[in-house]
Amino acid sequence: MNNLKKILQFLTFVMLVSLSACTNNQQEGVPTVGFVDAFEDSTIEQAKIGFLAALKEGGFSEEEQTMNLIYRNAQGDIPTLTQIIRYMITQEVDFIATSPSLSTIAAIQNTKEIPVFMMVSPTPALMQVEDAQGNSPANLFGVAENLAYIDTSFSLIPRLVKPKGAQLRVGLLYNQSEPQSVDAYDRLQGLAGSLGIELVARPVNTTADVQLVAGALLNEGIDAFFANPDNTVFGSFETIMKACNEGGVPVFTSEAGLVARGAVAAYGADLYQWGYQAGQQAVKFLKNESTEGLEWEMVKVRKRVYNPQSAERFGIEVPEGYEAIK
């Protein structure tokens, strides 16, 4: 098994090196931008689309030959993610754009000089990348989010879902290896108590665990499921939705993008706008050729959204002020 793993990692390295031929065919005299996604996900992809749209609006695009773009996706493999970051460093990119948090952490672990513009990532404190004095990495920029916004989404559940028994039971999966996922679980555990909700939470370590653990949760008679904001849930959301729909359990979330994929409702960041905001900051860097005056920012655009089909499936009347996902 170890030999197979080494072979796969070697093949990945060879693939990255062979792709350098394409990279060397770049326009001279224009900036070279690296963008790395940790895994394939239709929701998270919206951040990349928004980021590149902001760059194009600012005068930097591949189509107009005003920017070279090196894009790579690690397909959920951490060794590959690290190799991608190191490859971009050898290509002397002007900056590295990262999405989501796994990419951000990998980037700042491997370079202290190249600016990193993050998106779909929690704050440096939640990622546990601050130093002993509470300072963020000096080369970390872009846009982050904290956990305060999940309270609004979670608090919506007792307003819209009637319990089968004496107490409302809400299921939750969280990834023990992701600090922001554990922090969200801890926060929701406290919030559940104040709302009279019994939180039925189970840990998962990989997307491969999700189907089995989600099935076990459904067998415990939960009334609703809350999709925790972490990479494992993003990567296996269709598995969660399928199980919950078959079990007659509505899914709620704090991520607007997951509502388009079947969750009933959410109050959270618009991922396109999240990427766009990070892209605007990157444009300032490219134009000024300096990070002076830049620092990481909090998400500015959040939305209250709902999925009409999912709401109808479960007979849920969503409050006013929530926008239907088109």
Image: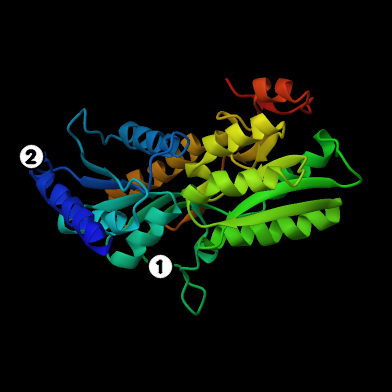
Inspect this view and state whether residue 289 appears: no
Q: Is residue 62 left or right of residue 142?
A: left
Q: Residue furthest right?
A: 166
Labelled disc at residue 293: none
Q: CA distance from mark 1 to mark 2?
A: 32 Å
**Rendering quarter of residue 9:** bottom left
**What residue is disc 2 on?**
25
Looking at marks 1 and 2 on the same chain, the residue that comes earlier in the sequence is marked by 2
Identify which residue is drawn at 54% across, 47% down.
Answer: 210
Identify which residue is drawn at 86% across, 38% down.
Answer: 164
Q: Is residue 201 left or right of residue 9?
A: right
Residue 163, compared with residue 245, is above or below; it is below
Secondary structure of the residue carrying numbered label 2: loop
Dot 1 crowding, Cα within 10 Å, few <14, some 14–19, many 20+: some
Is the C terminus in the top left, top right, bottom left or bottom right quadrant? top right
Identify which residue is drawn at 41% across, 52% down.
Answer: 118
Identify which residue is drawn at 15% across, 47% down.
Answer: 15
Secondary structure of the residue carrying numbered label 1: loop
**Residue 87: x, y in percent?**
19, 55
Q: Is residue 92 left or right of residue 166?
A: left
Q: Is residue 199 left or right of residue 32?
A: right
**Residue 188: x, y in percent?**
71, 55
**What residue is disc 1 on?**
137
Residue 307, compared with residue 71, is above or below; it is above
In the image shown, does 58 or 254 lie closer to the viewer?
Answer: 254
Three-letter amino acid code at the position of disc 1: Pro
**Residue 91: x, y in percent?**
15, 54
**Residue 143: x, y in percent?**
47, 50
Three-letter amino acid code at the position of disc 2: Asn
Q: Residue furthest bottom?
A: 132
